[in-house]
């Protein structure tokens, strides 16, 4: 996975943290958690707020669908 795979990242985060409401996660924690995903091969320094928001919303949609 890389930054353009925000939906896959969101799914992976939901699988790793199924009980966490993504809207409560600070971007600093979100960035760290993305970097800790085994499947993530992107460069952490290549992110920006827009990319983190896209991941957060993808994760939120996955979380909401499973509530």
Image (cartoon, rainbow, N blue to C red):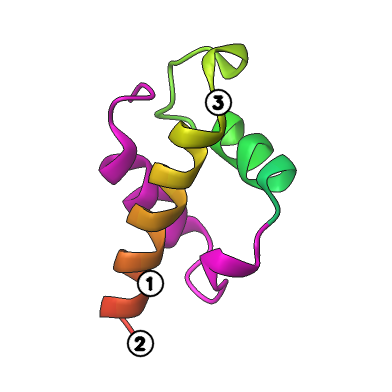
Task: Characterize the local packing of mark 3: few (<14), some (14-19) or many (20 or more) Cα atoms within 10 angstroms.
Answer: few
Mark 3 or 2, nearer chain start: 3
Contact between marks 2 and 1 (CB within 8 A): the answer is yes
Mark carried by residue 63: 1
Q: Residue at x 43, y 26 (%)?
A: 40
Quadrant for the N terminus in the image: top left
Task: Characterize the local packing of mark 2: few (<14), some (14-19) or many (20 or more) Cα atoms within 10 angstroms.
Answer: few
Q: What's the distance in space between the residues labelled 3 and 2, CA to CA?
A: 29 Å
Label 3 or label 1, whichever lies nearer to me, is 3
Question: Tag 1, which secondary structure?
Answer: helix
Which residue matches tag 3? 48
Q: What's the distance in space between the residues labelled 3 and 1, CA to CA?
A: 23 Å
Q: Where is residue 66 in the image (x, y as percent from the top left)?
A: 30, 80
Question: Tag 3, which secondary structure?
Answer: loop
Which residue matches tag 2? 67
Magenta stretch in the rendered image: 1-25
Q: Residue at x 53, y 77 (%)?
A: 19
Q: Is residue 9 magenta?
A: yes
């Amino acid at each position: 996975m890389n930054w353009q795979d925000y939906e896959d990242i969101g799914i992976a985060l939901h699988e790793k943290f199924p009980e966490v409401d993504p809207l409560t996660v600070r971007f600093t924690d979100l960035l760290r958690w993305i970097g800790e995903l085994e499947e993530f091969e992107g460069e952490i320094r290549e992110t920006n707020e827009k990319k983190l928001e896209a991941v957060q919303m993808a994760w939120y949609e996955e979380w909401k669908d499973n509530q």
